[in-house]
Image (cartoon, rainbow, N blue to C red):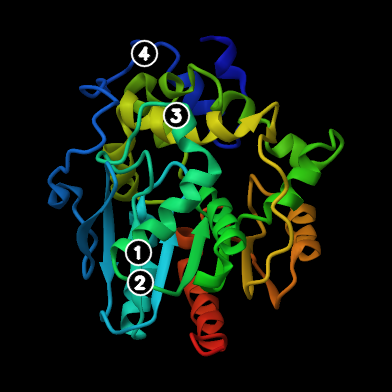
Amino acid sequence: MRSLLRFSYPGFVVSALACACGSEHGAAAPDAGRGATGTPHDASSLAPAPELQMTQVTVGPLVFDVRVAGPESGEVVILLHGFPETSYEWRHQMTALAAAGYRAIAPDQRGYSPGARPASVDDYTILKLSKDVVDIADGLGVGRFHLVGHDWGGGIGWAVAKIYAERVITYTSASTPHPDALQKELIDPSSCQHSASAYFDTFSSPDAASLFLDGDAGVLRGTYPGLTAADVDVYVKALGTLTAMTAALDWYAANIVDRKFAIAGLGLVTVPTLLVWGEDDQFFCKDTVELSRDYMQAPFTLKELPGVNHWVPENGADQFTMVLLQHLKSAGADG
């Protein structure tokens, strides 16, 4: 465990050292088991943000918790959260989208919804995570939709925009570059991105969940610079057990090998795309973000937000929401 405490992940080092003397699992007790994927739970316990509603969508044996807002007749915008967050991260955008007449839909994705938490690492591959998005859309009777993603949700969003391009009206990525651009930089040991992604090595390791949760989830609590204590508590409540944290980290274990993606290249994306990147992002380098242009075969806009870190939808909420609404308006369902 001592060796894990030396991993490089900006903002985590102090928290990791602080929790080194905690109990094996800190205050977070394991859940009853990881295999129960088909039993719905009380979604009202998730305390949705004001003006948002919580529903559930069943896809085969999986039950997804989904936040929704806005008129049912509005153009649909599906929003995919990142690690280690939940659909709560979209509370600002969902309120604004609803006010603008859109139907905003934000699922707690595979591993994050307690009813959609399969036990095998192999159940968290990018292809399966991508298919979940269209399956949830189908379950809600949605045909074409705008798509928004952040962090890991951004990576899945790029995959959906490629594999299911006929379903996606526009794509907006908060922070996350095109996966092929990321891969190209990751394999270059001299690149900024190779160094910035050093945390991949630890996040895909077997003991990563315990590292996050030791010492009353000290490392997990230290993950969200700029967020309020109340907002952090929402994420810790959702992910503060070994069961939940392990499932969230399975996204790394299933898809990252030796700091590189385990799947083939994605290729050119043909969906109109907006990429919004915070200039203080700790995890995605500017060179990687700029390289995303090389993998587009559709209109592409890169918007840089000064003074904003990796957590764009929350710490850059007003700026991000404004450019998102402009992007959606410029390429609506008839565009």
Instruction: Indicate the amino acid at tag 1.
Output: Asp
Circle 2 SS class: loop
Instruction: Indicate the amino acid at tag 3.
Output: Val
Q: Earlier in the sequence, mark 3 or mark 1?
A: 1
Instruction: Indicate the amino acid at tag 2.
Output: Val
Distance between the alpha carbons at the discs numbered 1 and 2: 6 Å
Residue beneath disc 4: 22
Circle 3 SS class: helix
Q: Earlier in the sequence, mark 2 or mark 4?
A: 4
Circle 1 SS class: helix
Q: Is residue 68 left or right of residue 325?
A: left
Q: Earlier in the sequence, mark 3 or mark 4?
A: 4
Circle 4 SS class: loop
Q: Which mark is residue 219?
A: 3
Camera-side mark, 2 or 4: 2
Viewer can see residue 76: yes
* Mark 3–mark 4 CB contact (< 8 Å): no
Q: Which mark is residue 142?
A: 2
Mark 4 residue crowding within 10 angstroms, few (<14) / some (14–19) / many (20+):
some
Instruction: Indicate the amino acid at tag 4.
Output: Gly
Viewer can see residue 226: no
Q: Is residue 138 left or right of residue 5?
A: left
The picture places residue 254, in percent across and down from the top left corner, at 54, 31
Distance between the alpha carbons at the discs numbered 2 and 3: 38 Å
Distance between the alpha carbons at the discs numbered 2 and 4: 47 Å
